[in-house]
């Protein structure tokens, strides 16, 4: 399998990097984070003009029909620039719509006119996305949605939400899960917006007798788990790609600091022990990059067991690399490495947040070693 980027893919990556370096600098990013909105309308417009939002949408809905590898390129560059815009949330929502048979709103997503968010997590569910108490009860041809979703990434910035709800079965059953598309303006829907520790935005969303038309149902009633599981794996693969970009930025910032910081009259980068640490950081990054590329290439596999194991293996290895690189970055910057004034601290925070999103290392390690379905049947 050839993992080299095509000329077009490399050009797209270069255009994104030029944008983040010129117009989304670290200082500009800090101003966005500290603003009331927490995101930049101008940055979102630029992403749409570059074609990033269209990349996640099929051609028949006005998109560019980008592959998972194409999306990996975008996420890596956005990670390198520590971009805090609602791109990941929108891409994940678009994948739900694609895997549920498509939806007309994808045309607006491709144009950058609609932002999406995925309301999947609940207060007591941990990393188990099948643990759902939010209910959607049939009522006169409609559905009435009640419940609460927590830590919805860019939930308050979204125009439309993808919501998982229970239409049957017990709270932790995989059967009886349904997916709905919910406009954020619906009566009975309230959002509590807040900034997360890594500078991103999230929201807790409450649904109180939100009445949805039958057309709001995505896919088949009560059969949403397979789509939810597949899209979550797609999201994990993209988060691993973003982490690669963040780790690249952390390594680059650390190396530059070692070259310029002096002690005993010489740059500290001349100390052999710190050179060895930088070499270890580089090896951790390259191992994480390799398995992330494999996971992204496998995430669309029709073999669900292969997809799950490869994606979980990547999340585990990337999580280990992120922990090592993040800690070394802070330590080699000294006390300054923990301050908001330096990029190093922001890299460490973002890597920590990625570790906790869509399953942490322990969750995916347990998932990886679980017996696949074909072994259980035997």
Image (cartoon, rainbow, N blue to C red):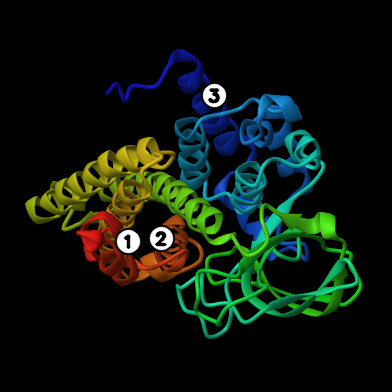
- Circle 1 residue: 326
- Circle 3 residue: 12
Quarter of the image that includes the N terminus = top left
Q: Is disc 1 placed on a helix, strand or loop?
A: helix
Q: Is disc 3 placed on a helix, strand or loop?
A: helix
Left or right placement of residue 288 versus residue 109 in this view: left
User: Can you tell which of label 1 and label 3 is closer to the viewer?
Assistant: 3
Q: Nearer the viewer, residue 227 or 78?
A: 227
Q: Position of residue 90 (x, y in %)?
A: 66, 49
Q: Is disc 2 placed on a helix, strand or loop?
A: helix
Q: Find the residue positioned furthest to the left.
A: 272
- Circle 2 residue: 351
Q: Find the residue positioned furthest to the top.
A: 7
Q: Residues within 10 Å of mark 1 (few under 14, many from 20)?
A: many
Assess whether mark 1 and mark 2 are in contact (beta carbons under 8 angstroms): yes
Left or right placement of residue 161 versus residue 309 in this view: right
Q: Position of residue 80 (x, y in %)?
A: 46, 44
Label 1 vs 3, first from the N-terminus: 3
């Amino acid at each position: 399998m050839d993992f080299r980027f095509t000329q077009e893919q490399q050009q797209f990556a270069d255009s994104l990097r030029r944008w983040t370096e010129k117009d989304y600098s670290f200082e500009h990013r800090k101003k966005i984070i500290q603003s009331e909105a927490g995101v930049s309308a101008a940055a979102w417009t630029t992403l749409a003009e570059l074609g990033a939002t269209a990349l996640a949408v099929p051609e028949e809905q006005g998109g560019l029909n980008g592959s998972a590898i194409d999306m990996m390129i975008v996420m890596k560059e956005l990670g390198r620039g520590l971009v805090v815009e609602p791109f990941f949330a929108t891409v994940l929502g678009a994948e739900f719509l694609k895997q549920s048979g498509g939806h007309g709103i994808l045309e607006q997503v491709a144009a950058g006119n609609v932002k999406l968010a995925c309301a999947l997590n609940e207060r007591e569910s941990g990393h188990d996305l099948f643990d759902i108490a939010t209910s959607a009860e049939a009522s006169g041809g409609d559905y009435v949605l009640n419940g609460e979703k927590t830590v919805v990434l860019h939930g308050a910035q979204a125009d439309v939400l993808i919501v998982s709800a229970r239409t049957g079965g017990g709270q932790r059953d995989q059967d009886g899960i349904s997916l709905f598309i919910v406009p954020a303006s619906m009566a009975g829907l309230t959002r509590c917006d807040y900034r997360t520790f890594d500078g991103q935005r999230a929201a807790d969303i409450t649904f109180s007798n939100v009445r949805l038309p039958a057309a709001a149902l995505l896919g088949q009633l009560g059969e949403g788990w397979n789509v939810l599981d597949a899209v979550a794996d797609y999201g994990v693969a993209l988060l691993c790609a973003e982490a690669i970009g963040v780790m690249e930025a952390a390594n680059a910032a650390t190396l530059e600091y070692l070259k310029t910081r002096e002690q005993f009259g010489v740059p500290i980068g001349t100390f052999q022990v710190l050179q060895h640490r930088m070499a270890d950081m580089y090896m951790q990054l390259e191992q994480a990059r390799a398995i992330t590329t494999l996971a992204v290439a496998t995430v669309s596999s029709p073999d669900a067991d292969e997809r799950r194991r490869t994606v979980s293996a990547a999340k585990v290895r990337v999580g280990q690399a992120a922990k090592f690189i993040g800690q070394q970055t802070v330590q080699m910057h000294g006390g300054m490495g923990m301050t908001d004034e330096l990029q190093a601290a922001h890299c460490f925070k973002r890597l920590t947040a990625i570790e906790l999103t869509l399953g942490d290392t322990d969750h995916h390690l347990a998932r990886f070693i679980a017996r696949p379905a074909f072994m259980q049947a035997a």
